[in-house]
Image: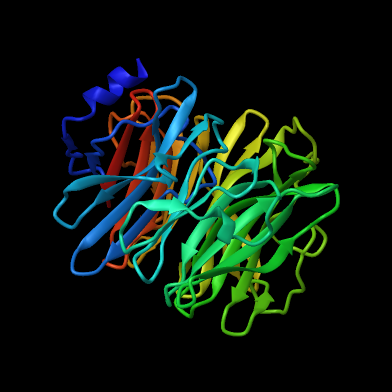
Amino acid sequence: MRRLLAAVLLAPLVVATPASAAATLTLVPYGIDSSNQAGWWAPLETYVGGSQYAYLAFNEPAATAGNHKVAIARRDGSGNWTKLPVMNGAVQAEYVDDIGHNQPSIARDGSGRFHVFASMHNNVWRYFRSDVTGGAPQWHSGDMPDQGIGVTYPVLATAPNGDVYLLARLDGSGSRTGRLYRWNNAASTWSRIAIIGNSPSRAFYPDDLQFDSAGNLHLLWEWSVYPSSGFRHELSYLRYTPATGAFSDHNGAAVTVPVTTATADIVQPMTAGEVYGTSDAIAVQSAKLTLDGTSPKVAYRYRTGATFAVYYAWISGGAWSREIAYTGSETSAAIDITWHPVDGKRIYYALTAGTDRAFMATKPAASWVQTSVAPGVPVSRLSVERNSAGSDVLYLVDLVNLRLYYGTN
């Protein structure tokens, strides 16, 4: 059935949204695997040169049931699609499905080379990089620091100077740490910057990292009980300044790394009844951030029993402020946020059921407004990036029909 659906997808399709909807969607003409779903990933990269390009890293079906192959869908400025296989030697990279863990993250460095981290759930590095500008990524795992350690949840961001930064969780005894790495684009080398988070009996869960207009890197993550849990807590923030190598909190105060749950800059503190455990009723589950200039804005999914809400957090009076942007039907572990010059914060989220599932929450006045961004499409996972041309580019996963959509808003 999976391959049959993939074959149907070969015919291009453009979905025009109604005037009241926010996004215009195009069906990516390649079939996806059912394992192509995550909340933490960074599967989308954009580039604006002479025209606008988009690169969507994804899992596609393999010949063996329960396996997937790793690929990149490339859209050029004229809307033409090509597919780049992610290569492990002479064959395309192929791994066993592990839903929620084995999805690829991608970045494009200042030389036009793709960097892809894929299929790591407590596995040693599975890292691929283009050898030539725009070329299919090749196996380069031996170039990474910290060899021989299990790695999970890689997220990526490209710096204004073309360097690439990576945040990931690495295994340890008694704790799982968060580590920050840098690809020096001029020297073509990777190095570890620091272990940024390490708390006894806790596991680090990366969410996002983004650069601001001043070149600072902003980082976001959650903590769980060690060794792991689907229920996380104490959503945390950190800022790194590459020019000085300094770490700081949201007010610019110096921070010593690695931070712990006792010293981290907490965006969402524990609430009444919230505890660390493996079956908690109250928890954070996925988060993303964006910047208004240099000011961080955060969107996250917060669960209280059977109630699921989407929260928005920002800095006010030197402290984190929080409010509910959406509450109602159950949401999936899919969320993102961008900053628009007119709309301000745009929070994207997905519901687990219904005819329309992908929505954008904005606050034009006193109240939040919910807009369907993909009417009629059962979106269950998403990623969004605002490109330098001023468009929100959307990566929308339809697991019901095994389809991937590219959108602009």
Quarter of the image holding residue 381? top left
Residue 128 image offset from top left, x and y in percent: 47, 52
Relative depth, front residue between 91 and 111:
91
Q: How many marks?
A: 0
Relative to 192, 290 lies left or right: left
Q: Residue 395, how many percent across, how many down?
A: 36, 45
Reply above or below: 264 against 334. below
Q: Where is residue 386 shown, x and y percent of the image?
A: 35, 60
Q: Residue drawn 27% across and 52% down? A: 409
Q: Is residue 145 left or right of residue 5?
A: right
Asked if 320 appears above or below 117 in the picture, the reply is: below
Q: Which is nearer the eye, 140 or 55?
A: 140
Residue extending farthest to the left is: 78
Q: Quadrant of the N terminus?
A: top left
Which residue of the protein is positioned furthest toward the top in this rendering?
Answer: 1
Q: Is residue 168 visible?
A: yes
Can I make out residue 289 in this image? no
* Residue at the spot 75% in from the left edge and 30% down from the top edge: 279
Residue under the point 32% across and 36% down:
404
Outermost residue toward the front?
A: 90
The residue depicted at 50 percent of the width and 30 percent of the height is: 329
Which x, y percent locates residue 199?
81, 55
